[in-house]
Image (tube, rainbow, N blue to C red):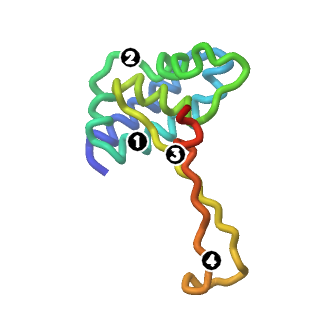
Amino acid sequence: MNINAKKAQDKLSQELSAAKLGKYAQAVAKPTLEALKIFCEQNEEFAQAVLQTDRTFAECAENAVKGAGGSISDIEVYRRAVSFYFKGADVHFNMTIDLGDGSDSDETAKPPVSLSLDSLLDF
C-alpha cells in the first residue's frame, strides 16, 4: 500500500471517530468508510483527493444520504461518497453468484453467473 493511501485511510477513520452524524448517516457510515478505504488503496489519485480536502467524512456521510428519504441503495451511497471527494468519479458494481456443483476442483466447477448492476441502474 502506498503512503498516501495509508494517510488517507487514517484521516477518514479519525474523522469518523470524531463525527456527530444524523441517524441516516450513522446507518451508512461504517460500510462507506470501509469502501472509501479500499478505493484509496485502489487509486492513488483518489487517496490524494481525500488527503487534500478540507471537507470531513461526516460531511461526506451526510451528503451521501441527503434527500434519500427512507431508503437508498448501497451503490448510490458509494457513488455519492466518491464524488464528494473527487468530482466526476464513479463506482462500478459487479455481483457474482456461484451456483456450485459440490466439486472442490476448479476444473470441474461450473463457471459463475455474473450480473452487472450498473446496467440495471442505468436508466
Say few, some or many: other residues with alpha carbon within 10 Å of mark 1 (under 14 / 14 to 19 / 20 or more).
some
Residue for badge 2? 55
Rendering quarter of residue 3: top left
Which of the two discs, 3 and 1, sits closer to the camera? Answer: 3
Q: Earlier in the sequence, mark 2 or mark 4?
A: 2
Pinpoint residue 18: horizontal percent, then vertical percent: 51, 20
Query: CA gap, disc 2 to disc 4?
Result: 47 Å
Say few, some or many: other residues with alpha carbon within 10 Å of mark 2 (under 14 / 14 to 19 / 20 or more).
few
Q: Is residue 12 left or right of residue 96?
A: left
Q: Earlier in the sequence, mark 3 or mark 4?
A: 3
Q: Secondary structure at mark 2?
A: loop
Which of the two discs, 2 and 4, sits closer to the camera? Answer: 4
Residue for badge 1? 39
Q: For the C terminus, which image quadrant? A: top right
Residue 93 marker: 3
Q: Are marks 1 and 4 in contact (CB under 8 Å)?
A: no
Residue for badge 4? 110
Q: Are marks 3 and 4 in contact (CB under 8 Å)?
A: no
Q: Earlier in the sequence, mark 2 or mark 3?
A: 2
Residue at the image point whose x is 61% and y is 63% from the top:
113
Which of the two discs, 2 and 1, sits closer to the camera? Answer: 1
Query: CA gap, disc 2 to disc 1?
Result: 17 Å
Query: CA gap, disc 2 to disc 3?
Result: 26 Å
Q: Secondary structure at mark 4?
A: loop
Residue 82 marker: none
Amino acid type, mark 3? Phe
Residue at the image point whose x is 60% and y is 35% from the top:
74
Q: Earlier in the sequence, mark 2 or mark 1?
A: 1
Query: CA gap, disc 1 to disc 4?
Result: 31 Å
Q: Is residue 49 above or below residue 99?
A: above
Q: Are marks 2 and 1 in contact (CB under 8 Å)?
A: no
Q: Nearer the viewer, residue 47 or 121?
A: 121
